[in-house]
Amino acid sequence: MAFNVINEARRCLNCKNPMCRKGCPISTNIPEVIRTFLEGDIDKAGETLFKNNPLSVICSLICNHESQCEGHCVLGRKGAPVHFSNIENYISDNYFEKLDQGAVEELELDKVRKKGMRVGVIGGGPAGMTIAILLARKGYDITIFESREKIGGVLRYGIPEFRLPKELIERYKRLMVSLGIRIRPNTSIGTTITIDDMFRDGYRAIFIGTGVWKPNTLHIKGESLGNVHFAINYLTNPDVYTLGDSLNVIGAGNSAMDVARTALRHGCKRVTVFSRSEHIAASITEVEFAKIDGVEFVTCVEPVEITDEGAVFVNVEHDEEGRHHRIEGTEKLYPASSTIIAVSQGPRNRIVSTTTGLDVTERGLLVTNTFGRTTRDGIFAAGDVVLGARTVVEAVNYSKQVAEAMDEYLCGLDR
């Protein structure tokens, strides 16, 4: 592994105008990281990655690199790009292992000057984890309120183990505890405890990063049947589902690939993914892995009904402007024991319905300014609850900006 990573790093051209960095949503200084690594200072390379992206080791595993950093590498125009994902994972994993062992002095708790100001973080997913780590390092007293029993959000409950080992999230938990961050699991804000209660108890600012956990529906007949499920619910705990021998997956994004590959690993003998478009929305890599695992694909079809025997689809065609039209008379039943709907998610409204002053969009997403400030003073938000379902690295990048805005806001308050 190390030898291959070193050879891969040596392929980097160290471009003066690095397109790889432009393709990275969080602007990782890839040439600098690689150069530092090759000079023998893996700790400094790891520190550079961590400072820029606290979830670097996670992003190295789950980012859509082919359309981001690696997809912009100039070497990829005529051959294979530098596979920075492998390099980043090796460096970040090494650095994080040292963080886990307390071997990195920069993050020692006694070196952080405490500011004596309490900040609440609602949601322990990628956005909440990023905010908590960044603000804890600035000296704020952080409490994470997590509605589930463990932190991680979509990282833990939406991405399969074979793509993202859960032990990695446990390592992040240990890091956050070492930074003095308190975690309240099984605590849903908006039910027993409200945001007003938090302000009453001395929280000077509150961050909302609750993600999007309400499945979008198709609004077709049959969605309430006993053999129909939603992707985000299934991925939360696949072990509790009995899908039978065959599965239809409606939707063709990365979540659909996760569902399909997970179902095969849990006993399904035949899994078919259906896409309305001829183009599969998931990343090329995820589609390739799905095909290798045995997933079948049907494109240019649209679901019209779900039955006990399977799902009925109609063929569609697309005009020059990209609009789709049903081809009448082409309805066909695709038999399957179960059907899983994977057409993205939206936010739940528990917090909004119990908190005055928070505006939302027509989609139920929180309204914020460029720096994450909501329409109520002292409350900030980032991640999917603001942007809709996006990538983890996009959530981290936005959360970095929001953390700076929260720090500026807090520094302006009377102590």
Image: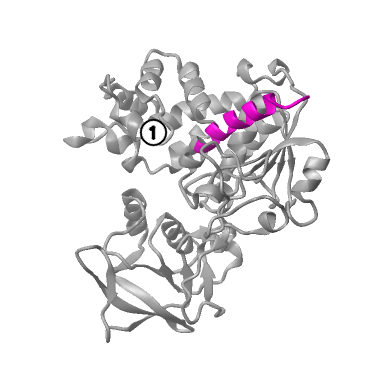
Q: Residues within 10 Å of mark 1 (few under 14, many from 20)?
A: some
109 or 6, nearer to the observer = 109
Q: Is residue 259 above or below residue 30?
A: below
Based on the displayed image, in which of its 4 quarters is residue 280 positioned? bottom left
For image coordinates 61% across by 38% down, the residue present is 129
Q: Residue furthest right?
A: 201
Q: Residue furthest left?
A: 78
**In screen coordinates, is 132 left or right of 126?**
right
Look at the image and tell me in which quarter the C terminus lies: top right
- Range of magenta residues: 398-415
Image mark count: 1
Where is mark 1, residue-wise?
86
Predominant SS along the magenta part: helix
For image coordinates 29% across by 29% down, the residue present is 19
**In screen coordinates, is 384 left or right of 271?**
right
185 or 247, nearer to the observer = 185
* Whether residue 171 is visible: no
Q: Is residue 17 above or below residue 152?
A: above
Residue type beneath disc 1 = Asn
Q: How far across and how far down the image is residue 331, in percent?
A: 32, 84
For image coordinates 27% across by 32% down, the residue present is 73
